[in-house]
Image: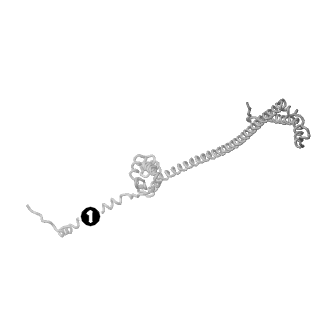
């Protein structure tokens, strides 16, 4: 059995050199066929758009929901069909289903997240016509513009509703302030009236107490007058009074002038004493009558004190 020895690099180069015409023809044919195939391939243009999302950390869930809804809308038939009808990018001849499927293949949507928050969205569309690819990409991005307009409109409506609610609350607060002021005025007037009533009540109590003191004084004076009148009557009827009045006359020689003057004054004042007491008693009776009249003419609500 014959064995083959290993060839060296120089020997391989020598073989290629010996078959150089064949190698050149094969290489030329491959290059020409490759050039022809590449030349027949249509030029593909890609239009790319980037949408950056922004929002507060508290609105993270709302932004995620909006981005997910917008992504689903981009690939929905309801959204792609009007674009196909407007531009007719595939010349499908009325076959909307095939055109929608082909557009979904040419359309690419990528979402970049950062800590579970959509940072940006990249929308890419490929087509042989660069102008058409640009227009289609613009229409695709308009979804987010419409979404922003809808959000702005909703925000404006919320602000208007909030402003109307704030206005209603302010009106209610004004009405409550007016009611509170009216209530405070009523309470103040009621306090003044209560003070006036208290002052009047205190005056009535003071007048009643003064009437009571006057009545006590009247009663005491009447008792004193009665006791004095009783004493005078008893002194008139008593034998002692007779003895004093019927005492024998002492001779002038044994009595001094001072004793005679005292006896004369006693004789002159003794008969007049009952008349003075009667006058004072009449005055006390008149004062008692005036007090009784004043008690009968007291206003309604005054305190009347009746002694037993």
Position of 32 with respect to 19 (left or right) is right
> Outermost residue, left direction?
1
* Above/below status of 136 relative to 250: below
x, y percent for residue 123? 42, 55
> Outermost residue, right direction?
252
x, y percent for residue 205? 72, 39
Q: Residues within 10 Å of mark 1 (few under 14, many from 20)?
A: few
Position of 150 with respect to 5 (left or right) is right
Q: Nearer the viewer, residue 107 or 27?
A: 107
Position of 27 with respect to 304 (left or right) is left
* Above/below status of 107 relative to 225: below
Q: Nearer the viewer, residue 155 or 80?
A: 155
- The residue at 68%/43% (across/down) is 191
Specify the quadrant that holds the C terminus: top right
Give the quarter of the image for residue 275: top right
Q: How is the image coloured?
A: one colour
**Which secondary structure lies at badge 1?**
helix
Specify the quadrant that holds the N terminus: bottom left
x, y percent for residue 237? 84, 29
* Above/below status of 217 relative to 18: above
Would residue 152 be seen by someone viewing this image from the given angle?
yes
* Above/below status of 179 relative to 145: above
x, y percent for residue 279? 86, 36
Q: Nearer the viewer, residue 18 or 105?
A: 105
Q: Nearer the viewer, residue 33 or 174?
A: 174
Would residue 110 be seen by someone viewing this image from the given angle?
no
- The residue at 18%/70% (across/down) is 10
- Residue bearing the label numbered 1: 27
Position of 263 with respect to 134 (left or right) is right
């Amino acid at each position: 059995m014959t064995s083959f020895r290993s060839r060296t690099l120089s020997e391989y180069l020598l073989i290629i050199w010996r078959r150089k015409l064949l190698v050149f023809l094969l290489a030329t044919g491959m290059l020409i066929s490759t050039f022809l195939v590449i030349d027949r391939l249509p030029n593909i243009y890609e239009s790319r758009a980037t949408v950056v999302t922004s929002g507060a950390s508290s609105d993270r869930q709302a932004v995620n929901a909006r981005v997910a809804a917008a992504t689903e809308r981009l690939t929905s038939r309801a959204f792609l069909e009007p674009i196909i009808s407007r531009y007719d990018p595939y010349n499908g001849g009325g076959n909307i289903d095939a055109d929608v499927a082909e557009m979904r293949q040419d359309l690419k949507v990528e979402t970049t997240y950062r800590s579970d928050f959509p940072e940006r969205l990249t929308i890419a569309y490929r087509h042989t016509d660069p102008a058409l690819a640009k227009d289609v990409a613009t229409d695709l991005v308009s979804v987010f513009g419409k979404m922003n307009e809808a959000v702005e409109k909703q925000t404006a409506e919320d602000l208007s509703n909030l402003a109307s609610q704030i206005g209603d609350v302010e009106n209610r607060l004004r009405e409550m302030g007016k009611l509170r002021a009216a209530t405070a005025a009523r309470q103040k007037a009621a306090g003044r009236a209560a003070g006036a009533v208290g002052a009047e009540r205190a005056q009535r109590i003071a007048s009643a107490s003064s009437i009571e003191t006057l009545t006590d004084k009247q009663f005491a004076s009447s008792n004193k007058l009665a006791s004095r009148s009783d004493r005078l009557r008893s002194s008139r009827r008593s034998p002692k009074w007779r003895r004093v009045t019927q005492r024998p006359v002492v001779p002038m020689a044994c009595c001094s002038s001072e004793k005679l003057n005292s006896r004369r004054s006693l004789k002159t004042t003794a008969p007049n004493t009952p008349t003075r007491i009667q006058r004072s008693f009449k005055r006390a009776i008149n004062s008692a009558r005036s007090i009784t009249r004043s008690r009968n003419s007291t206003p309604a609500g005054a305190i009347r004190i009746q002694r037993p």
